[in-house]
Image (tube, rainbow, N blue to C red):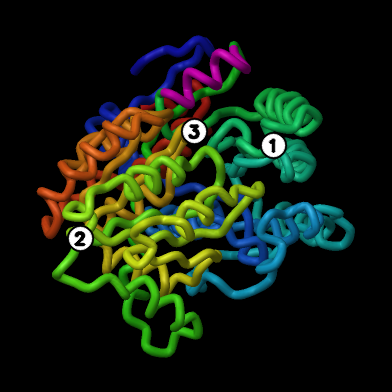
Amino acid sequence: MTTSDFGVASIVPSEATQNDQASSADRPASAICLVGPGWRFTSGISYYTCRLAHSVAEDGHQTSVILLRHLLPRRLYPGRDRVGQKRSSMTYDADISVYDGIDWWWGRSLVGALRFLRTLRAKILVLEWWTAATLHTHLLLAMVGRACGARIVIEMHELQDPGEAGLALARLYGQWGLRTLLRLAHGCVVHSKSDWQLLESGYGPLNARVALAAHGPYDQFAATSSDPNAFDDDAISAVTSAPKPEVINLLFFGLIRPYKGLEDLLQVFNSLTKDEAERLWLTVVGETWENCTEPAHLIATSPYSDRITFVNRYVTDEVVGAAFAHADIAVLPYRRSSSSGILHIAMSCGLPIVVTNVGGLPEAASGYDGAVFVSPGDLGELKAGIMEAIQMAGQKFADPRDWHEITEAILQAAATATDQP
């Protein structure tokens, strides 16, 4: 056990895997309710909430989910054109009670959610935190949950969305709100020591237990990699267009935002010699946010544009599966990052990965033999990392991550002093 600046006992991954998993088997099952985004505004946290709910249920706990349906006014959402369109093939199992869902303006949707919460009598209420857009709903649910006798746990995906952090009012609102929410919480789950340190430096000391557990594996896409009836078949054809095995297919996947560093990867690719470029193919799949149009310009003007596949939208699960199945190397040139679901898809697929040493990414990829770490913004290092990863192309690596560690972290964060093993 360790003690953080919060003045409370905290769990680190090595202890969770060596000691606490054994105690988890002895701990009685609990009623756990997760609060996270639904599928109308599909995001990485939508997938995370669903995947975690199944893991919690597999661990024998009574599991329920309250989905946040309309996250914010549609006109304010960067991916507004796809809101309400089906993107995920994931569903919640029948043994998981789901309320879908709460709208940002509340109304009857909130009344139904509060009735659902009172009926469940959940012992632990887990609030997935990644954006200030959900703050008002999280605050109310935390207060109602406490009144109903539930232990409140906040699971931190990042302290503040990068786009919100760039807007003064949104930044101040989010910081004030998260501080208030933390005061209502009994515990908190973080996914890296980096986030833990940021939380303590910005918001501590607070009277809450902190548990540390790595993000679980995103292994749900393998079963969707070859669906012949997928309606996004043009995108599937595109992401599988790299001629294999003649070339090594580099994959950049995910939202195209300024902090993702796609421009760095494209500058490296565009500066390759002709001989180097003939060995490679670059596949870029992602939806553009925050007017980040420089990558599209670099692709259009590339001397090797005929060796770049660009799918500029938020794609379906079938495309995700096809893109990673056809990739040889995943490249994550992020300039900053708290965590990355894309990293965990790549590790679940066993791919060699070139990833920058920023935020929680080194911890997330620790123990993964296929990871090549480079400095953010260093084009020379990025190129060298890609060349190193090329030597591993074709190899498959074991993913060291485990969802059950997060379930245990939730139980630890929610525990009282008398609950300690």
Between tags 2 and 1, which lies in front?
2
Whether residue 221 is visible, yes or no, is: no
**CA gap, disc 3 and disc 2:** 46 Å
Of pointers 3 and 1, the one earlier in the residue sequence: 1
Q: State the predominant SS element of the stretch in magenta.
A: helix
Q: Count residues near mark 3 (Cα–Cα under 10 Å), then give few for <14, some for 14-19, many for 20+.
A: many
- Name which residue lies at 48% across and 42% down: 260
Assign the C terminus to one quadrant of the image: top left
Q: Is residue 270 magenta?
A: no
For badge 2, the amino acid type reads Glu
Is residue 385 positioned above or below 81 on the image? above
Q: Count residues near mark 2 (Cα–Cα under 10 Å), then give few for <14, some for 14-19, many for 20+.
A: some
Q: Nearer the viewer, residue 61 or 50?
A: 50
Of pointers 2 and 1, the one earlier in the residue sequence: 1
- Where does residue 153 sit, x and y in percent of width and height? 58, 36
**296 horizontally vs 329: left or right:** right
**CA gap, disc 2 and disc 1:** 41 Å
Residue corresponding to mark 1: 164
Q: Count residues near mark 1 (Cα–Cα under 10 Å), then give few for <14, some for 14-19, many for 20+.
A: some
| Mark drawn on residue 189 | 3
Q: Nearer the viewer, residue 117 or 231?
A: 231
Residue corresponding to mark 2: 278
Magenta segment = 194-204
